[in-house]
Amino acid sequence: MERLVGGASKRCSGKLALTRSHSVAFGSIRATLLLWFLLITLGSVAAVAVVASVLTQRNLERSILEHLAALAETRAVQIEELVDARVAAISALARDPSLVRAFESLESDEKVPAEFESFLGRLSEGLGLESLALVSIEDRVLIAFGSANGLSGADLTRTPWVGGPLAAAVDRAGTLLQADLSSLQPLAGRRRPGLFVAGPVLDGPRVAGVLVAQIDEGPIDALIGDVSGLGETGQTVAVHDDGTSLVVAAPLRDDRNAAGTRRLTRDVETYRSAIRGEGRVGYGIGPSGREVIGAWFHLPALRWSVSVEQDAEEAFAPARRQAWTILAVAAMLAIPAALAALVVASTLGRPIRTVSHTLARAAEGDLRDAPEAAGRGELRQLLESLARMMRDLGGMLGGVRHTSRDIATTAAEVRETAGRQHTVVQDLGSSAAQIAAAVEEMSATGSQLATTAEGVGTLAEDTAARAERGRQGLDRMRDSIGGLDRTSEGVCGHLAEIRRRAEGVGAVVVSITRVANRTNLLSINAAIEAEKAGAHGRGFGVVATEINRLADQTAAAALEVEAIVEGMQQSVSAGAEAMDGLAGVVRSSVETASGVAGDLAAILEAIADLRDRFTGLRDGVEAQSQGALQVRDAMRQLRDSSRLASEVVERLQSSAVRLDEASRGLEGAVDRFQLENGSS
C-alpha cells in the first residue's frame, strides 16, 4: 500500500509538473486553444487539398491519355491514307502501256522519247513524288527521273543496294505482282533516307520491269509536325527499326534534322513494342530523355511506331496550380480560425484557472477551501463537482487514517503468528527428511536383495535347464546303447551262422581233396596204360599227364582253402567271444545310464522346488521395496510440502512487515493533508 500511496503522489506530482510544462510551452490556455484550432483547421484543409489534388491528377491523367490516344490514332490513320494513296497511284501508273514500250526501248539500248520523260516528270510532280525510276527484271535501274537521278545505272544486286529495303521491295513487287512499300532506304549524298513504292509493269502475263517511285516526305512531315493541342512540349514521334537500332523517321519539334540521324537509346522497348503491333498508353522516356506521357501506335503500312507525346511536367502543371490555390485558401482560413480560438479561450480561461489553482492547493495537501461555483453550463458543473470531490476526499482521508492504524495492529499479530508457524514447519520438514533418508536406504537394501534373489533364481533356472539337457542326453545315450546291444546280439548270430557255413565249406574242401586224390590215381593208371599202348597211347598219355597236373593243383588249392576256412573259423570264434563281452558291457552301461537318469530327475525336482522358493522370496522383496518407495515418495512430498509451507510462512511474514510499513506510510501520507477540522 505504501507503493500505491507513493505512486499516487508521484502521479499527481507528475501531472502538475506536466501542466506547468505545458503552460511554459504554450504560454497560456489561449495559446494552446489557438494552436489546436489552427491545427484542426489547417489539417482539414490540407486533407481536402491532398484528396482534391489526387483526384484532379487522376482525372487529368485520364483526360490527357484519352486526348493523346485520339491524336495518335488520327495521325496514324492520316499517314496510312496518304501512303495508301501513293501506293494506289503507283499501282495504277504501272499498268500504263507506254511503260512497257519504255522498257522495251531501254532494253534494246534505244533512247526513251523526250515526251515520255516529260510525261513522267509531270506525273511525279502531280502525284507528290520526288522521283521515278524504271528497274529491269534483273534488278538494274535503267533510267531515273527527279531527285533519284543518282539511281541511273545502279545494280540492286550489288553493294550498297543488295539486301536493302529498296531491293527487297522490288523483289516483292516482281514476285507478288502487286505494288509494295519499302522501308526507309539510305541514299548516297542525302542525310535523310528515302521511302519508295515499287509497282510491277506487266506485259500480259510477263513482268516487263518494276516502276519505282520515291514518296515525297513533305506531306508526312506536315502531319507529324502538327502540334496543335499539344502545348509547348507535345509532338508526334515516328520511329522505325533499321535492323540495328531504333531511328527517328521524321523531324522532331525540337530537332528538324532528326529524321534518319537521331537514334534512340532509352526506353526503346516501348517503341519496339509499338513497331511489333503492341500499342499502349502511359508513361515513357521521349527522344529528348525526359519523362513523357503519351500514346504509342503501330503504323502497318510503313512498319513504324507513331506516338503522340507530351512532357509530363507540362501535362500536370494545372494540377500543381490547383494544389497551390488550395494551400492559399488554407492560409486565408487560418486568420478567422485564430480569432475564433481567442474568443473561446477568453470564455473558458477564467473557470479553468480557478480549477487549476484549486487542484494545485489540493496537491500540496490543503483541502480546506472548496472552489465557489461560477459561470454556466458544463463549467459550473465542473466547479461544483470539484468542490464535492474535495469534501468527499477529506472524509475519505479521515477514515483512511483510522484504518491504517488498525492495519498496523493486525500486521504485528500476523507477523508473530507467522513466526511460530515457521518454527513448526521447519521441525516437520527436518523429520520428514530423516524419515525419507531412512526409507530410501531400506528401499536400496531391498532392491539389492531382490536383485540377488533374482540372480539366484536365474542361476537355478539355468542349472535346471542344463540338468534337463543332461537327462535328455542320457536318455538318448541309453537308447543308443540299447540299440548297440541289439546290434551286438545280431552280430553274434551272424558270426555263428558264418561259423556253421565255414564248417560246411571245410566238408566240401575235404570232398574236393578226396576227388583230387582219386583223380591223381586215375591219371597214374591212365599213364601206365598209355605206356603200354606205345605210339597209339601217346596222346592219351599227354592227357593223363595234364589230368594229373590239374589234380595236383586242385589238391593244393583245396589245402589252401581248408587253411583259410580254419583261420576264418578261428576269427569268427574270437569275434563271437568279443561280441559276447561287448554285450555284457553294453548291458552294464544301460543299467548305469538308467541310474544316472534317475539321479538327474531327482536333481531337477530339487532345483524346481528351490526356484519356486527363490521366486517367492524375490516377489516378497520386490513388494517390500515398492512399499518402501511409496513411503519414500510420501516423505518427499511431505518434505516438499513443508518447504512450500515454510516459504508461504516466510512470504506471510514479509507481507506482514510490508503491510506494517505501508500502514505507517499511509498514515504519514494522510497526515500531510489539512482537513476542514484543522487536524493534521
Image (cartoon, rainbow, N blue to C red):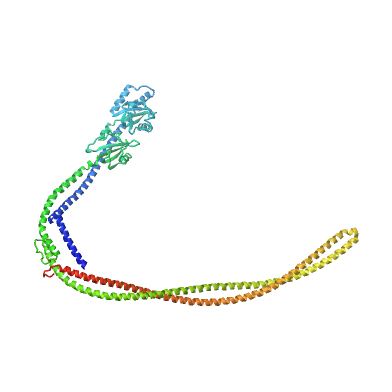
Residue 14: x and y in percent read: 18, 61
| Relative to 406, residue 549 above or below | above
Residue at 44%, 77% (x, y): give it.
620
Q: Quadrant of residue 534?
A: bottom right
Observer-nearest residue: 305 or 24? 24
| Relative to 500, residue 235 above or below | above
Residue at 16%, 52% (x, y): give it.
39
Residue 569: x and y in percent read: 74, 70
Observer-nearest residue: 164 or 514? 514
| Relative to 627, residue 116 above or below | above
Q: Quadrant of residue 67?
A: top left
Say left or right for 195 vs 556.
left
Q: Quadrant of residue 172?
A: top left
| Relative to 434, residue 94 above or below | above
Say left or right for 96 vs 462.
left
> Which image quarter holds the N terminus?
bottom left
Observer-nearest residue: 471 or 260? 471
Residue at 70%, 73% (x, y): give it.
577
> Which image quarter holds the C terminus?
bottom left
Query: Is residue 96 among what the camera can see?
Result: no
Residue 526: x and y in percent read: 87, 63
Residue 404: x and y in percent read: 19, 71
Query: Is residue 427 among what the camera can see?
Result: yes
- Please give the count of numbered marks on the rendered protein: 0
